[in-house]
Amino acid sequence: MAFANVFLGEISATNATDLRVSFVVMNSAGKVLSDQLAFAGSARGLGQLTSAVRAQVITWAATVAGGSLTLKPSEVWMCGLADDQVTGVRVSADAPTSNPAFIDVPNLQFILAPNANYKFEFTGAYTSAAATTGMQLSVNGPASPTFMRAVGTIYTAAATPFSAAIGSYDAPIAALNSGASTALPFSLVGTISTAANGGAFSLRFRTEVNGNAVTILRGSFGELVAIG
């Protein structure tokens, strides 16, 4: 069985939005890598850091001279972290948008490896500026995946769920209406299989009515599981 053990080292910050993580890898062919990743532009949680490191290790293992390995995400073990195949992220502050075009939800992002399979889930609550303004959801990720399918549910009233399925990036779960200032739940679950391209995978949202804000509330979260 192929595998790679990853030992995280120092996580440091040069400023509020620039994090760096160092790590050491040993793979089952006996090859060792010491490396560092930098994350600039937005603050990152531990889940986002570890998913990015995992993707980097898979790329390295496939190309290292004299001992290349084809690794699945589930074969990259983040040593010292409990339940390390589940990566979690969360919204740390209420996130509004008045934009009728999809934008990424702050912090609800993972880094996917190339040629890998994942299950993802996003769950949380939202409010809206008016009962006649709905929130709409989608996802975006690495170019040209071999497969992506998701099923989403957005409540437009306490006992009124709106559900739909999507099979491509920025295809909308297009709910109409909302509970206005009353917080209502949403969820989106699915699977994705990447091809040659790895990279960022994000939950996205938009308002139904230009200029009327919808807000994903603090505490909404995402989980990513490597499968297959």
Image (spheres, rainbow, N blue to C red):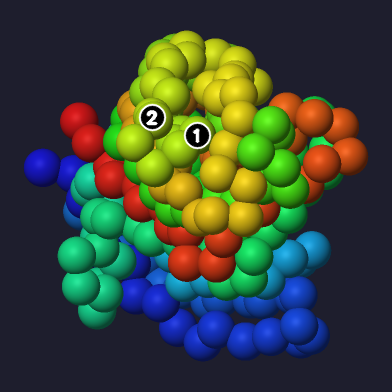
N-terminal-most mark, 2 or 1: 1
Is 215 rendered above or below residue 2? below
Using the rendered view, name the quadrant where residue 190 is placed: top left
Could you tell me which secondary element the residue under label 2 belongs to? Answer: strand
Check contact, mark 2 vs mark 1: CB within 8 A. yes
15 with respect to 141 (left or right): right
Could you tell me which secondary element the residue under label 1 belongs to? Answer: strand
Q: Residues within 10 Å of mark 2 (few under 14, many from 20)?
A: some
Is 92 rendered above or below residue 142? below
What residue is shown at x 60% (from left), y 24% (from top)?
A: 176
Is 44 rendered above or below residue 157? below
Tell me where residue 72 appears, x and y as whole percent. 28, 38
- Amino acid type assigned to the residue bearing label 1 in the image: Thr
What residue is shown at x 26% (from left), y 74% (from top)?
A: 81
41 with respect to 134 (left or right): right
Front in this rendered view, residue 28 or 105:
105
What residue is shown at x 38% (from left), y 60% (from top)?
A: 88
Residue 193 appears in the picture as rendered: no
Residue 17 appears in the picture as rendered: yes
Q: Residues within 10 Å of mark 1 (few under 14, many from 20)?
A: many
161 with respect to 176 (left or right): left
Tell me where residue 118 appears, x and y as whole percent. 33, 35
Q: CA distance from mark 2 to mark 1?
A: 6 Å
Classify the position of the C terminus by image quarter.
Answer: top left
Image mark for residue 156: 1
The residue that disc 2 covers is 161
